[in-house]
Amino acid sequence: MDDSYRILLTAAVTFAIGSFISLLASRITGIIFGRITARTSTKTDDFVLQSIVSAIKPLGILISGSIAWKILPIENEINNAVLGLIKLVCLILIVRVINKILLRLIQRWALRIDDNSVSTMLRSLSPMVRALVWCIGFVVYLQNMGVQMAAIWALLSAGGIGAGLALKEPVQEFFEYITILLDKPFENGQFIHVDGVWASVERVGVRSTRLRSINGEIIVLSNSALTNGKISNYGEMEYRRLVHKLGVVYETPVLKMKKIPGLIKEIIDSTEDAVFDRCHFIEFGNFSLDFELVYYIPTNNYLRAMEAQQEINLEIMKIFEENEITFAFPTQTVYITEEKKEII
């Protein structure tokens, strides 16, 4: 038999035996792993082992093909190109399996964590983990193909500096996003006040946060603007403490002045969602006798709080009118004497 035919037959037999061994190994491994995973109640280990078993057969066939190819008397350039292609396909298979397993584990960790913000952060890291695995895989591939890595590392370093400068703001916003998820200054659905904006949080994004203002429009603020600003979060507020000043005219009799705290207390006690704290005559103002009223509204619902405050204000106006008590407003009295006509 001619040597070329003998070599070709040897390569074909090698490929066939290697493929058969790969199929047999895949089948045996699947049976063994199936018995192991049957003893556990979780499905994650089933997924991991199934992903590994599914990669054994194609990897074994590719390795068998590369061994068989090396037997053939092919020119170096073609030989290196084909072997490089086989290694590339093997790399893609391995990286895909690793990514599938890592992403499944991240998803499982996210589901097991009770904290919704932390689980959301873990899910948001999935694209970064996938990209990192692909980068490491291609670096290993290039090194295995004999590429001078010193030049590659220098190029990556220079590119990394340029990319770092170009992506400074997006990266900063991403870390501010992580800060929001971990520190929890607010959560989705909560009502907040920041930089003069009164709005409820609709969605916290990787780069920006969407707010729905009390007027109805969507307001988009960068995460850094939120974390660097002063945020008032009303979502976790158990009660509101309201402090008001009431001024009455100086002509108000002392008996009516004494009645005012009791009248206001009755109003607040009879109002739903309001708890009276105190009401005192505190000072002689420039144009009024001033009372300070303090009460609590035990709710974090802004609309209910405003309705309770409105009801209290209207009842105060009503009770003052019934008792002939006059509210003061800024005035200035001018006294003129008949003799000197002076303004005091």
Image: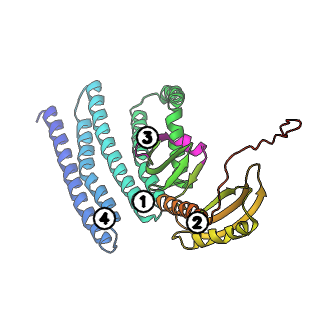
Quadrant for the N terminus, please: top left
Label 1: how many residues lie within 10 Å, few (<14), some (14-19) or many (20+)?
some
Residue type, mark 1 in image: Ala
Residue 207 appears in view: no
Residue 222 among magenta residues = yes
Which residue is labeled 4 in the image? 46
Residue at point 30%, 29% (across, down):
80
- Spatial separation of the CA atoms under disc 1 and disc 2: 63 Å
Residue 41 sits in which quadrant? bottom left
Residue type, mark 3 in image: Ile
Q: Earlier in the sequence, mark 2 or mark 4?
A: 4
Q: Nearer the viewer, residue 110 or 266?
A: 266
Residue type, mark 4 in image: Asp
Foreground: disc 3 or disc 2: 2
Residue 5 among magenta residues = no
Is 315 left or right of 133, judged from the image as shown? right
Which residue is labeled 3 in the image? 136
Numbered circle sitting on residue 322: 2
Residues drawn in magenta: 215-230
- Image height of 166 relative to 141, above or below: above
Foreground: disc 2 or disc 4: 2
Q: Earlier in the sequence, mark 4 or mark 3?
A: 4
Residue type, mark 2 in image: Glu
